Image (cartoon, rainbow, N blue to C red):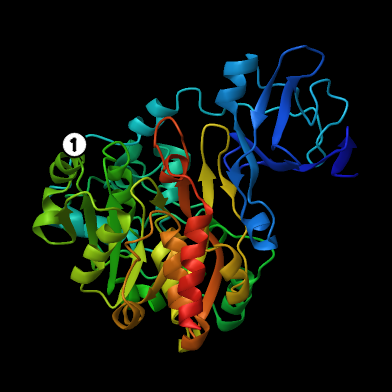
């Protein structure tokens, strides 16, 4: 199929790449001699409108072509103009004789999964706070470190869409007063000694599960390090999970988690919950507030009085200077030997840190480990983004490592500093490039397991990627930085 045609001595070319990762936009590019535009129409209808294609395209920029030729057509725009998102035709001409090649046409947007997305998100933020008796808190922590207890699995399949505070532990120990409650997908059960409400006097510690033998462990490790099929934590049985917990506990307990936030009161609680209540609790979770003007800080203080008192959770307040400055504030005050990052509108799987920590110390040679993530949105759910092997030359072209998925040694920050405050966009890409530049010989290991939930919603979350345009200036800036380093 050709991607160009000639009409009245005007050369047209273009291509429809497909849908964006959240299934909300149709993406592609188009170029002609005078102006870059396309016609968007309904099949078997005269309804149509003209669309100017001026989105910055990285691939065209690197090829030396006009980079402002891309299009991202959002479903909201098509609904507004055509009153439908079904049977869409993209063409070079108004009469639909020359369709854009690429994605098979006509095009129909995927159906909406969440009819009331805002209500679903808010329902995950439960009432209450973390001020519970220390004995109960210790029992909950003990249960989380028990390899036969799969917190996310319990929450996702039996209790609530996503775990919050101590809710999954409380329900696992009390629900229906059943003696042996199944708490993982492998039918392992809570010990018989845990039968009643959590405040029984002589509660026993959860027994250690004998971890996998060397041959069995190697099989699972090979699977996770394979680039082919992405795993999820629930795929692996308790004996192997016990090995991961045993080997990673020390690293996780020395990890500082950095969460920047600005006016994210509707999502920040879910993010903090997922960081504070990991399978193994990190050293500290540092919320770096970038001058919020909503009730973000009020909600945090109301929700976590105990964690704040114990300094497991810390808040650093500053005026509104951008995400890079906010993260740098957190990094400068962090006490951990390892750093992990979480955006205030995303969420970690409870096993996120134990898997990254295990592979960071695998063979004792790595400086950075990174996993992959799932996408959630109004038209997409549990969509796993494939991981890529680390290659610095490829990383110079575009960023394929999400910062939410990264764990690294503190020494990288101590030697090279933090985030570039002069950049408004692509700051995550720049820091990864800085930490992995060839002259450092940084050892990087991809961990092919989805341990992050990435939430995308233009209406609800107002993700920064929707609000600030990527343009050539950002890439020129980063390219200048790269040349200096070489």
Relative to residue 111, is residue 193 depicted above or below?
A: below
Q: Position of residue 332 (x, y in %)?
A: 21, 70
Q: Position of residue 114 (x, y in %)?
A: 51, 28
* Residue at horizontal 46 percent and vertical 64 percent from the top: 477
> Badge 1 is on which residue?
295
Q: Position of residue 154 (x, y in %)?
A: 43, 46
Q: Position of residue 448 (x, y in %)?
A: 58, 65
* Residue at horizontal 39 percent and vertical 56 percent from the top: 350
* Residue at horizontal 13 percent and vertical 62 percent from the top: 311
Q: Left or right: where does residue 215 sit relative to residue 325?
A: right
Q: Which residue is more in the foreground, 369 or 352?
A: 369
Residue 147 in view here? no
Q: How many marks?
A: 1
Residue 154 in view here? yes
Relative to residue 54, is residue 272 depicted above or below?
A: below
Q: Left or right: where does residue 23 sit relative to residue 451?
A: right
Which image quarter: residue 269?
Answer: top left
Q: Residues within 10 Å of mark 1 (few under 14, many from 20)?
A: few
Q: Which residue is more in the foreground, 114 or 421?
A: 421
Image quarter where the N terminus lies is: top right
* Residue at horizontal 60 percent and vertical 79 percent from the top: 218
């Amino acid at each position: 199929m050709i991607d160009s045609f000639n009409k009245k001595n005007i050369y047209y070319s273009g291509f429809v790449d497909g849908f964006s990762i959240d299934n909300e936009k149709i993406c592609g590019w188009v170029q002609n001699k005078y102006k870059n535009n396309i016609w968007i129409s309904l099949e078997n209808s005269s309804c149509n409108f003209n669309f100017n294609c001026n989105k910055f395209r990285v691939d065209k920029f690197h090829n030396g072509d006009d980079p402002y030729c891309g299009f991202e057509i959002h479903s909201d725009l098509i609904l507004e103009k055509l009153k439908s998102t079904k049977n869409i035709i993209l063409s070079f001409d108004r009469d639909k004789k020359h369709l854009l090649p690429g994605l098979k046409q006509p095009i129909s947007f995927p159906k909406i999964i969440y009819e009331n997305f805002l209500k679903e998100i808010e329902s995950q933020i439960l009432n209450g706070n973390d001020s519970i008796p220390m004995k109960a808190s210790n029992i909950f922590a003990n249960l989380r470190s028990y390899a036969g207890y799969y917190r996310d699995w319990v929450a996702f399949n039996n209790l609530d869409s996503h775990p919050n505070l101590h809710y999954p532990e409380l329900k696992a120990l009390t629900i229906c007063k059943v003696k042996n409650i199944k708490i993982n997908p492998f039918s392992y059960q809570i010990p018989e000694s845990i039968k009643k409400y959590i405040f029984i006097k002589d509660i026993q510690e959860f027994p250690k599960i004998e971890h996998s033998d060397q041959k069995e462990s190697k099989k699972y490790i090979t699977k996770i390090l394979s680039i082919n099929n992405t795993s999820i934590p629930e795929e692996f049985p308790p004996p192997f999970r016990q090995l991961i917990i045993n080997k990673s506990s020390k690293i996780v307990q020395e990890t500082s988690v950095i969460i920047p936030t600005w006016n994210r009161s509707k999502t920040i609680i879910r993010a903090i919950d997922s960081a504070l209540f990991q399978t193994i609790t990190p050293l500290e979770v540092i919320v770096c507030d970038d001058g919020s003007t909503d009730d973000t800080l009020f909600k945090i203080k109301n929700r976590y009085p105990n964690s704040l008192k114990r300094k497991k959770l810390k808040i650093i307040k500053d005026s509104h200077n951008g995400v890079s400055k906010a993260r740098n504030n957190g990094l400068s005050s962090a006490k951990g030997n390892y750093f992990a990052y979480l955006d205030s509108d995303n969420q970690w799987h409870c096993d996120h840190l134990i898997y990254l920590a295990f592979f960071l110390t695998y063979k004792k040679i790595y400086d950075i480990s990174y996993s992959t993530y799932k996408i959630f949105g109004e038209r997409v759910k549990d969509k796993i983004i494939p991981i890529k092997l680390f290659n610095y030359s490829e990383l110079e072209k575009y960023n394929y490592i999400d910062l939410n998925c990264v764990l690294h040694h503190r020494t990288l920050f101590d030697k090279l500093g933090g985030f570039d405050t002069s950049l408004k966009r692509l700051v995550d890409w720049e820091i990864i490039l800085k930490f992995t530049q060839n002259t450092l010989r940084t050892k990087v290991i991809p961990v092919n397991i989805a341990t992050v939930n990435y939430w995308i919603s233009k209406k609800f979350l107002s993700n920064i990627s929707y609000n600030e345009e990527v343009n050539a200036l950002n890439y020129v800036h980063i390219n200048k930085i790269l040349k200096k380093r070489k």
